[in-house]
């Protein structure tokens, strides 16, 4: 009796593994969790205070569907100063998390029969969102270093192409698309008139001399076609608050708002007040978290390459490592499930991200947990 639409989609592997690992931990098992990507830091104090104040001041009623005007203005200011994109507040929508704005954006622009180019490896929910919008995902390989090029995209363009998904820094690979390629990709989108969804949730997590560039900042033509999606979840350790935001043309924003008005209505206004403080208050906590992730990234990259049968390219951004495990002789599903059962370490199989032969480790965990988990992986493989 369940709809075909829902029967066609797979459960979220990242959330399923996270739930299983957390359940085992609750049962008293000493699990090391490298599963879902969520900062291990607490939400900064000033942000928590803003939410408490909102409750005390009775900011507890409906807000406009697409978010509070003050928050839209703060988002527009942030887009202008950090991303160099000039969006009017009427070109902004606030949703219930990054996932929600991405979902609404796809529902707003995709129709049955449309093709959406999805560079692989990709975050688990992109494929299912495209399918829910009744469009066809067209997978696009990114080669050994996972760095998308304009050439990769060009090969997949057809008359039916309506959308390209960009996610740089990437979940799950950590790769950052080179600015020179972003420029060429923008030209392809404009010449072939398709939309680009740019998921920029890891924008702050670009390490070393790697440069992050928002595609919509390049010129007005590509800005009109781009739907720039983001959230406060990763940057401000606010995963549970569920606030995402998006900048796009008024036409797209109005369509998304229409859809949102019949589903969630406004995101929690208490969480919106917290997000307002996150974007406009002191930013020191972001710098501290990025610095800590960078140290962990270097450690994880080095340690993974010391393990027999595992090799890992250096992640340039986000907080994931995506090592190759082919030499262990196991496929990614077996590797992940046996690692959890036999060595009590949770990782996500690459197959869920459209890339067999790999697993994803989130290094948004403490140094102590990282050392412990990687030692366990090393010993577990040695025993095989
Ligand atoms: N985006 C994070 C991840 O990939 C959180 C879980 C999810 O929403 O998929 O692990």
Image (tube, rainbow, N blue to C red):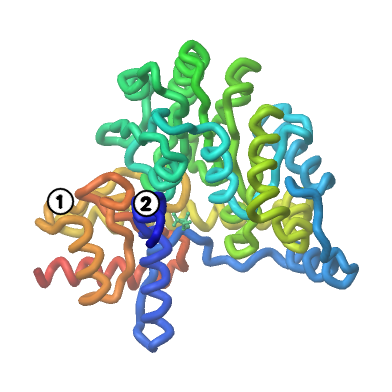
Residue named by callout 2 = 4
Q: Is residue 8 above or below residue 372?
A: above
Placement of the C terminus among the 4 image quadrants: bottom left
Q: Residue furthest bottom?
A: 28
Is label 1's Cβ within 8 Å of ligand 1?
A: no
Up-down: is 35 above or below 254? below
Q: x, y percentage for residue 289?
A: 58, 57
Residue 372, x across and y down, in percent: 34, 73
Residue 171 in percent (x, y) is at 42, 47
Residue identified by numbered label 1: 326
Q: Residues within 10 Å of mark 2 (few under 14, many from 20)?
A: few
Could you tell whether 197 is left or right of 59 in the image? Answer: left
Mark 1 and 2 residues: CB-CB less than 8 Å, in contact?
Answer: no
**Camera-nearest residue between 376 and 39:** 39
User: Does the image show residue 29?
Assistant: yes
Give the quadrant of the N terminus.
bottom left
Identity of the residue drawn at 38% across and 66% down: 16
Residue at image coords 55%, 30%: 213
Q: What residue is rendered at 75% in x and 56% in y?
A: 272
Q: Is residue 75 left or right of residue 8?
A: right
Q: Which mark's residue is nearer the viewer, 1 or 2?
A: 2
Q: Is residue 178 above or below residue 383?
A: above
Quadrant of residue 360 within the rendered picture: bottom left
What is the spatial separation of the Cα atoms under label 1 and label 2, in whole angstroms?
A: 35 Å
**Which label is found at residue 269?**
none
Q: Mark 1, residues whose alpha carbon is within 10 Å: few (<14), some, or many (≥20)?
A: some
Secondary structure under tag 1 reads: helix
Identity of the residue furthest to the front in this view: 1
| Circle nearer the N terminus (1, 2) | 2
Q: Position of residue 284 (x, y in %)?
A: 69, 54
Q: Tell me where residue 81 sits by quadrant.
A: top right
């Amino acid at each position: 009796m369940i709809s075909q639409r829902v029967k066609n989609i797979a459960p979220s592997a990242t959330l399923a593994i996270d739930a299983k690992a957390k359940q085992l931990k609750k049962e008293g098992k000493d699990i090391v969790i490298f599963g879902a990507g969520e900062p291990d830091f607490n939400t900064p104090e000033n942000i928590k205070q803003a939410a408490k104040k909102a409750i005390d001041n009775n900011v507890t009623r409906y807000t406009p569907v697409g978010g509070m005007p003050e928050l839209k203005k703060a988002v527009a200011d942030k887009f202008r100063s950090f991303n160099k994109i000039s969006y009017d507040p009427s070109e902004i929508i606030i949703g219930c998390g990054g996932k929600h704005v991405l979902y609404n954006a796809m529902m707003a622009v995709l129709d049955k029969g449309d093709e959406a180019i999805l560079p692989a490896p990709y975050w688990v929910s992109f494929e299912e969102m495209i399918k829910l919008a009744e469009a066809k995902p067209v997978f696009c390989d990114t080669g050994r270093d996972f760095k998308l090029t304009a050439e990769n995209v060009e090969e997949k363009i057809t008359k039916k192409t309506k959308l390209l998904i960009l996610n740089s820094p990437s979940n799950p690979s950590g790769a950052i698309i080179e600015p020179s390629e972003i420029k060429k990709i923008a030209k392809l989108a404009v010449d072939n008139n398709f939309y680009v969804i740019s998921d920029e949730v890891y924008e702050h997590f670009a390490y070393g001399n790697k440069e992050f560039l928002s595609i919509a900042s390049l010129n007005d033509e590509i800005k009109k076609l781009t739907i720039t999606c983001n959230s406060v979840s990763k940057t401000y350790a606010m995963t549970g608050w569920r606030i995402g935001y998006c900048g796009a043309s008024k036409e797209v924003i109005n369509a998304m708002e229409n859809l949102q008005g019949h589903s969630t209505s406004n995101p929690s206004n208490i969480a919106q007040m917290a997000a307002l403080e996150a974007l406009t208050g002191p930013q020191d906590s972001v710098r501290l978290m990025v610095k800590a992730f960078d140290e962990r990234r270097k450690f994880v990259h080095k340690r993974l390459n010391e393990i027999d049968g595992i090799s890992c390219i250096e992640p340039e951004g986000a907080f994931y490592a995506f090592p190759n495990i082919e030499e262990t002789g196991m496929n990614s599903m077996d590797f992940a499930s046996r690692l959890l059962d036999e060595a009590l370490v949770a990782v996500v199989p690459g197959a869920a991200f459209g890339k067999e032969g790999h697993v994803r480790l989130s290094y948004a965990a403490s140094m102590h947990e990282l050392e412990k988990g990687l030692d366990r992986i090393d010993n577990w493989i040695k025993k095989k």
